[in-house]
Amino acid sequence: MENSELLKELRIDRGAVPPPSRRPLWVALAILVLVALGVAAWFMFAGPAALPVRTAVAQPMTGAAASASVLDATGYVTARRSATVSAQMTGTLTELHIEEGDHVEAGQVLARLDDSAQKASLAQAQAQFNAANAQLAQGEAQLAQSRRDLQRMQDMVGRKLVSQQALEQARTQVETQTAQTQWQHRQIELAQAAVKSAQVQLDYCTVHAPFSGVIIAKAAQVGEIVSPLSAGGGFTRTGVGTIVDMDSLEVEVDVNEAYIGRVVPNGRVESVLNAYPDWKIPSHVIAIIPTADRSKATVKVRIAIELKDARIVPDMGVRVSFLEERKPAQAQTARPGVLVPVSALRKDGDSDIVFVLKDGKAQRRAISLGGSVGDAREVRAGVSAGESVITEAPAELKDGAKVEVKS
């Protein structure tokens, strides 16, 4: 019985929960190890991501590019011939025939003032002139009659038919009427001058264009009072508009007096408008103004624009490059150095550098700079013709960094 009891105690309890297995934990640990090894291998073999950049090819300095800039400056487009057009008298504006941007010809009517008073003055002066003419005609008729009477009396005196006193009175009458006729002539001249004066005053009511050009400002409106003199208070306009002769446009720049020796009269210049940076306008020096600005230590230089174009308007900002004169013996010869875009140039302390693309990496180069040629700069040493220089890149670009040229 004891053995049977022991056997009963050794039977298997099928309702009991088996202990948990550790196999999933080992699988998860193995996956994590494999992921870590993959990331480490990627960083070891692939390295950091390539930086996106843009490049340009360094161009050789040929005879066509021999006109390097000896001096750069900034200035503005100015109009040598510009006028604020106004009436020559004070009056109310009744007509206005201009708008901004209108092209006008010399003598064209731009505006009219109220001329009712001037027309009345002209009519009065004309009437006085006519009255003076009538008085002169009357006086000349009387003088002619008096001269005939004098002639008859002279004949009658010889025959003792009239007295000597009557003859003298007739002669005096002729002389008096002659003087009156001369006075009437002067009165006619005075009346004629009054007519001309009244006509001038009437003409002043019409505003004409003094020269051909373009209206750049409309300064008054119909109904406003216009005067050539400022009356104060802001209610009287001193002009009806501003006209500019577009053929008189030129460039004015201030050159530091330390470099004014590089500018020569009639020297060649390349002008670039800030509004159109890719448009190079041929120009030349008109004159160097013979005075300096003491406060800025600059000298003003006038530059002629050789190409007339509607895109050039007054007060535009301009960058100008004064070009060195091309020597005939060097016109077709190659020069040392290359041309690279200005955007490729960088500063590293006091050194000028560029980054050159080599085998997919950025290579730092110290360079020696020359003059400017348009939007490019001469590099005399450090870069060879045909090499690709980096023009646009992130700020973190360093020597040896992997780069990728973006389109």
Image (cartoon, helix red, strand yellow):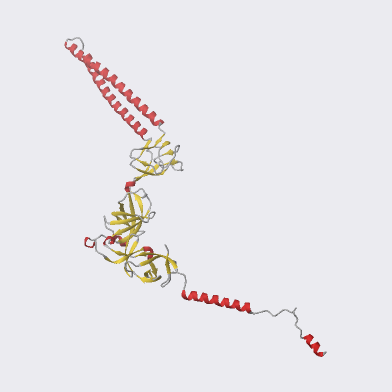
Residue 280 placement: quadrant: bottom left
Q: Quadrant of residue 182?
A: top left
Q: Identify the residue at image location x=27%, y=65%.
A: 335
Location of residue 172 with respect to 115 vertically, above or below: above
Instruction: Please name whichever residue, 262 or 196, is drawn nearer the observer in this view of the structure.
Output: 262
- Write the residue at 80% across / 88% down: 4
Q: Visible in this render: residue 165?
A: no
Extreme residue toward the right, this view: 1
Q: How many marks?
A: 0
Quadrant the C terminus occupies: bottom left
Of 288 and 276, nearer the camera is 276
Which quadrant holds the N terminus? bottom right
Among the 4 quarters of the image, the one containing residue 208 = top left
Left or right: 398 with respect to 305? right
Q: Residue at x 38, y 29 (%)?
A: 121
**Residue 76: % across, % down:** 36, 53
Q: Residue at x 32, y 24 (%)?
A: 130
Please tell me which residue lies in front, 105 or 393. Answer: 393
Res. 171 in view = yes
